[in-house]
Image (cartoon, rainbow, N blue to C red):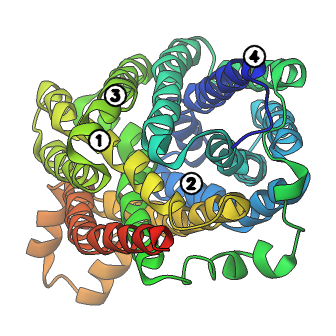
Amino acid sequence: MSIIPEKRLKAAIGFIFVTAVLDIVAMGIIIPVLPQLIEEFVGSNARAGIINGLFVALWAGMQFVASPIIGSLSDQYGRRPVILISCAGLAIDYVLMALAPNLWWLALGRIVAGITSSSFTTIYAYMADITAPEKRARAYGLIGAAFSGGFVLGPVIGGFLGDYDPRAPFWAAAAMSGIAFFYGLVILPESLPREKRMKFSWRRANPVGAMVLLGRHRELSGLAGVTFLLHFSHHVFSAVFVLYAQFRYGWGPKEVGLLLAVVGLLDMATQGLVVGPVTKALGDRKTMLLGLFGGTIGMALMGWAPVGWAFVAAMLPNALWGLAMPTLQSLMTRQVSESEQGQLQGATMSVASIAGVASPLFFGWIYSLSVGGGFEPLTDWLGGHGLGLIDAFVHAPGLAFYLSAIVLVLAFVAAFITARRAERAETSSVDAARRP
């Protein structure tokens, strides 16, 4: 399974968790202030919604290009150097954004961040290297819990620092990524044996070529479709949440930071404590479906919530969403060989990145419409007719969350059909291997 001696294995797992926490803390620190910094540059909440969605899409576009390359590089050269270089790159990127004098500098910062944060694919491949297939759902749940722990700390720190100085969170994020780099330099061992490495190939490493792996089996491509829908729905938060909370409930950086910390705590509890027992009782497929159902209910309630406390209450069913991703990833890793885990994670991240490009642009546009921005060309074209329909959109600021819930319904249906086929195919292959 792994070349890491038992004594160093615990240290390696500890590093993965600590690195995940530090990376997500660094990313979470800037969440409460980046949209407001954009708003300062453009001078409008509605325009900031569109620009922020564009920036999130730019970040995801870079992940789409870089993830399969990074995944394939880790399959040839090992996981350790890829993770360390990415940590160093993130530290440099946050310094760049801290110094940004205009939107163009921020855009460049999002490009660099999209490339360097693609190391998440290698982190998941690292865990696949050192974890037995039947234990991967729980392992991925623990990584998800580490990510959530980072989101508990990051937005709170960013919210308070942002009240002091909107640039301060970026400097703090740079320090966090720098700490992760130096910590890994000392602690992290390699997880992929040389005899199991696969030579780098541009045919596999380009985004389209990497996704050929996903089309190898009908079950794998179906699960990739569920991945796309799940990420498409989830990006409603990165695209509009901060601006939405400010517009509808009057929340500033501190309130947004604290609320995101609550989200992180709930997600950490779900993925760290609940995924293991629930998957043991229900199996990966049913656990994933339960998570998608809870996310659907939570999203719909968030769109409806007329007051802040109702939005907070909607986080409880939405927290079940944390059951879906680790079980979905576990089902996918069991469809490929050990030497293809890095390529799989790169291809999966590319799928997520496609969603990350399309979703923020879509939800940013929807949010801008729903709060009254961006209608000028349409009203000019209508010449005053059909304005009643436009008014309905103007008075529906939660529209983006309603549409996100509909996307999750589609994901639930696709997962119900595809995951059952995947489990049956896996059972058939195991039975065939046992026959004399």
Residue 45 in view here: no
Q: Is residue 400 above or below residue 261?
A: below
In the displayed structure, does residue 21 sit left or right of residue 71? left
Instruction: Say if 300 sits above or below 25 in the image.
Output: below
Residues tagged 1 and 4 counted as in contact (Cβ below 8 A): no
Quadrant housing the N terminus:
top right
Q: Which residue is mark 3?
A: 263
Q: Amino acid at mark 2?
A: Val
Q: Which residue is mark 2?
A: 56
The Cα–Cα distance between marks 2 and 3, rounded to whole angstroms, is 20 Å
Q: Nearer the viewer, mark 3 or mark 4?
A: 4
Disc 2 to disc 4, C-alpha distance: 40 Å
Looking at marks 2 and 3 on the same chain, the residue that comes earlier in the sequence is marked by 2
Give the residue pinned by disc 1. Answer: 279
Among the two numbered marks 1 and 4 on one chain, the one whose residue lies closer to the N terminus: 4
> Looking at the picture, which amino acid does disc 4 mark?
Lys
Mark 1 residue type: Thr
* Mark 3: secondary structure: helix
Q: Residue 370: name its quadrant.
A: bottom left
Q: CA distance from mark 3 to mark 1?
A: 22 Å
Q: Which residue is mark 4?
A: 7
Which one is closest to the eye, mark 1 or mark 4? 4
Q: Position of residue 198 (x, y in %)?
A: 84, 65
